[in-house]
Amino acid sequence: MKYAIITGASRGLGEAAAKRILEEGISVVSISRTENEALARFAEENNYSFRHITCNLELEKEVEEVFSDLAFALFKKNPEKIYLINNAGVVDPIEKVGNLDQIPVLRNFQVNLAAPILITNTFFKASQNMETSILSINITSGAGEHPIEGWSIYCSAKAGLNMFTQTAALEQESMGTSNQIIAFSPWIMDTGMQETIRSAAPEAFKDLDRFKEYKEQGMLRKPETVANALVDLILHENIINGKIYNVNDLLN
Ligand SMILES: NC(=O)c1ccc[n+]([C@@H]2O[C@H](COP(=O)([O-])OP(=O)(O)OC[C@H]3O[C@@H](n4cnc5c(N)ncnc54)[C@H](OP(=O)(O)O)[C@@H]3O)[C@@H](O)[C@H]2O)c1
């Protein structure tokens, strides 16, 4: 049996990836604060194996409890493979350094960086002495490699996620496990996150007009297009451990 755990499957890229993975016959566990009832119905109507667990990834205790319980429940079934898709993300706070507030900064790091680290740690630990192999996929951003004014927190969190991915991959290689960990950069997609970006204050975000143009000129990809590229990659390609994949290299 194969399982996919997808954080942020309530909308955007996570929802599109969940649908496509269900269609591949893989059991999906969705994790987010809100439940997407349409997604649950889609799974039920098609007899797909689907479960939603409500969890706020800002809260490290909740992350610890939910994912330890989930790992325990899944590993008991001795699954062949677990795809761990750390997709949930937040772009806020969009603000210049000097005007940042403490709580949004810490929340951003919790969701974008600490939660993927803690979740991967829990699952890699649970996989020790088991036959199950884990493929952990951290959804990153070009902003993790290129600075964008107003996005210092998001850029830093995604840069940290890239480095975590590369370091953890080296460790798994050295230990000779069958676990792999990669990052996947989805470029720009027409999701709620882009709405948040377009509603930023012009004085806080220098590139606001450029991001409005992406939408006006139809340059944002549908999340379904990006999800298909992601799922084709993880299910059908030879994965290079530690690689930061970019959707633009996969779609032509
Ligand atoms: N959209 C883009 O152009 C773009 C570009 C580059 C990278 N990315 C990355 O792609 C990934 C998906 O982005 P998206 O555009 O699909 O975003 P989105 O539409 O805004 O969806 C974000 C998802 O994250 C979940 N989430 C946010 N905060 C959470 C929390 N505290 N606890 C649990 N879940 C939480 C949300 O669920 P709930 O609200 O229900 O909790 C939602 O399902 C993110 O990692 C993002 O950084 C996006």
Image (cartoon, rainbow, N blue to C red):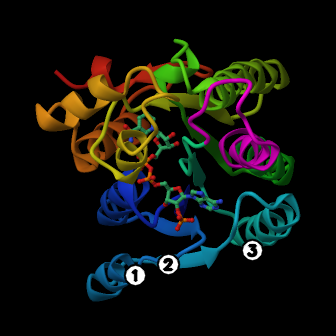
Q: Which residue is mark 1?
A: 40
Q: Nearer the viewer, residue 226 or 24?
A: 226
Compared with 70, 185 (above or below) is above
- Residues under labels 3 and 2: Cα distance? 21 Å
The residue lying at 67 percent from left, 30 percent from top is 153
Q: Nearer the viewer, residue 208 or 79?
A: 208
User: Magenta stretch mostly in which secondary structure?
Assistant: helix
Q: Which residue is mark 3?
A: 73
Image coords of residue 3 (percent x, y): 54, 61
Compared with 92, 161 (above or below) is above
- Residues under labels 3 and 1: Cα distance? 20 Å
Q: Provide the residue span drawn in magenta.
A: 93-115
- Left or right: 60, with 20 as reference point: right
- Does the beta carbon of the residue at mark 2 sit less than 8 Å from ligand 1? yes
Dot 2, how many residues are within 10 Å of its Cα: few (below 14), some (14-19), or many (20+)? some
Compared with 122, 206 (above or below) is above
Q: Which residue is mark 2?
A: 35
Instruction: Check contact, mark 1 vs mark 2: CB within 8 A.
Output: yes
The amino acid type, in three-letter code, at marker 1 is: Ala
